[in-house]
């Protein structure tokens, strides 16, 4: 669940500079007698440059952009050309299966297609010859019938009738042959062509290639082992892209925007703070065991370190306001008197000297010093002992 970093910051962000300049309740002089009798002690801090950040903190998880790869067919692993941890390019061959059976199937499908083509060609040639002979017979019958019609006195009515019937039958036979020939020429070899394509695809699927560039995270099999088309063989970290994923409670999700700056810290990678930005905010809620409504937020991490691992827990800080590389002193070291800000410093002789400064932004823990102080000077202030 998302929590505000130093809950009093909400008020401080809005009025911090005003409080500092106006001498309000933002800074109080800590004396030895304050704090209901709690013992106080002097603290010395060397002033340095640092960043002051006000934001929302949330627990999250590091997630790699992963691509799971599997062969398109079953088989025995014949060759593995990469190792875990290898950096590979898109299109690189990862592994190969024994392809002898699939190669035989492809060659058989090709042979069947060629045989079907030859049979079709033979049928077409035969049909062309038949059409040519039928056409010649038809022309002969037409000439004979025309002659009989031209000199009807030379032929009986029965002879002319039979010749006309023979001519009509031959005409019908010829037209039917034309239709058959047209169908034969259009005869589809799709079935055989499809078998070739499927066999070719199976053969190609015996080679597993990387669809993206990245790092090989894992390989599930060794040479000689059997793999199916339903199990992952390799996992690739795509382009070394790293995300942080967190849940943001519904009351705070309105403060989160796509493109918003984010800092991510990981306990396993100490002393490093990774910059990123919000890349996605889920529109669908996720309820946790307590019944609170949260929304998943994804953050793209820029320049991730090699030490980051998938699944690591992290802290995500959504930046609301930030002042970078400024002179900072502890919040407790600044006190306001008459609308002016003062701190106590050590001079060259080691004496405590009060000095006026001009304060700027604060997150409730540190204060930005705009004027009146130099880096590496030492601030002295009273701090309540813990316990």
Image: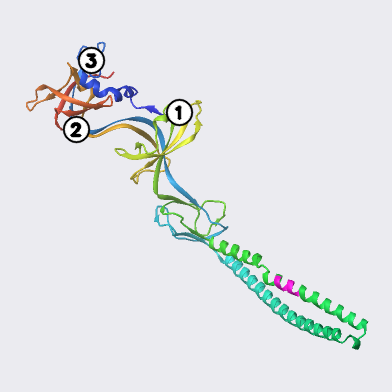
- Mark nearer the N terminus (1 vs 3): 3
Q: In the rendered image of this protein, does residue 94 appear above or below residue 149?
A: above
Secondary structure under the numbered disc 1 in the rendered image? loop
The residue sitting at the left extreme is: 349
Stretch in magenta: 177-182
Left or right: 244 as drawn, with respect to 140: left
Prevailing secondary structure class for the magenta stretch in the rendered image: helix
Pick the front one: 350 or 196: 196
The disc label shown at residue 39, or none = 3
Pick the front one: 188 or 368: 188
* Viewer-side label of 1, 3: 1
* Viewer-side label of 1, 2: 1
- C-alpha span from label 1 to label 2: 38 Å
Q: Residue at x 7, y 28 (%)?
A: 348
Q: Residue at x 66, y 74 (%)?
A: 115
Q: In the rendered image of this protein, does residue 154 appear above or below residue 296?
A: below
- C-alpha span from label 1 to label 3: 42 Å
* Location of residue 92 in the rendering, given as x and y in whole percent from the top left corner: 44, 59
Q: Look at mark 2 in the image and give the residue it sits on.
A: 48
Quarter-wise, where is residue 319 in the image? Answer: top left
- C-alpha span from label 3 to label 2: 28 Å
């Amino acid at each position: 669940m998302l929590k505000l970093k130093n809950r009093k910051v909400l008020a401080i962000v809005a009025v911090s500079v005003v409080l500092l300049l106006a001498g309000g309740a933002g800074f109080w002089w800590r004396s030895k007698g304050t704090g209901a009798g709690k013992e106080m002690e002097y603290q010395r801090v060397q002033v340095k440059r640092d960043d002051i950040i006000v934001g929302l903190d949330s627990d999250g998880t590091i997630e790699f952009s992963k691509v799971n790869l599997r062969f398109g067919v079953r088989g025995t692993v014949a060759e593995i050309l990469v190792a875990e941890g290898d950096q590979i390019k898109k299109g690189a061959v990862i592994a190969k299966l024994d392809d002898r059976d699939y190669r035989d199937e492809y060659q058989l499908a090709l042979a069947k297609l060629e045989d079907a083509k030859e049979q079709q060609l033979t049928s077409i040639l035969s049909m062309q010859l038949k059409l040519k002979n039928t056409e010649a017979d038809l022309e002969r019958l037409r000439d004979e019938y025309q002659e009989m019609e031209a000199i009807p006195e030379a032929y009986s009515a029965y002879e002319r009738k039979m010749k006309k019937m023979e001519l009509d039958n031959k005409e019908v036979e010829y037209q039917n042959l034309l239709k058959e020939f047209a169908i034969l020429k259009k005869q589809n070899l799709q079935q055989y062509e499809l078998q070739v394509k499927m066999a070719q695809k199976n053969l190609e699927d015996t080679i597993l290639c990387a669809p993206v560039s990245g790092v090989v995270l894992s390989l599930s099999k060794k040479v000689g082992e059997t793999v199916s088309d339903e199990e992952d063989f390799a996992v690739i970290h795509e382009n070394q892209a790293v995300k942080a994923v967190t849940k943001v409670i519904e009351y705070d999700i309105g403060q989160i925007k796509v493109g918003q700056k984010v800092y991510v810290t990981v306990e396993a990678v100490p002393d490093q703070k990774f910059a990123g930005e919000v890349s996605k905010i889920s529109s669908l809620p996720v309820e946790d065991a307590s019944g609170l409504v949260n929304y998943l937020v994804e953050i793209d991490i820029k320049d991730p370190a090699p030490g980051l691992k998938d699944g690591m827990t992290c802290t995500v800080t959504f930046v609301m306001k930030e002042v970078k590389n400024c002179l900072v002193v502890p919040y407790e070291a600044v006190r306001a008197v008459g609308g002016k800000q003062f701190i106590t410093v050590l001079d060259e002789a080691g004496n405590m000297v009060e000095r006026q400064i001009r304060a700027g932004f604060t997150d409730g823990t540190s204060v930005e010093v705009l004027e009146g102080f130099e880096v590496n000077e030492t601030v002295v202030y009273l701090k309540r002992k813990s316990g």
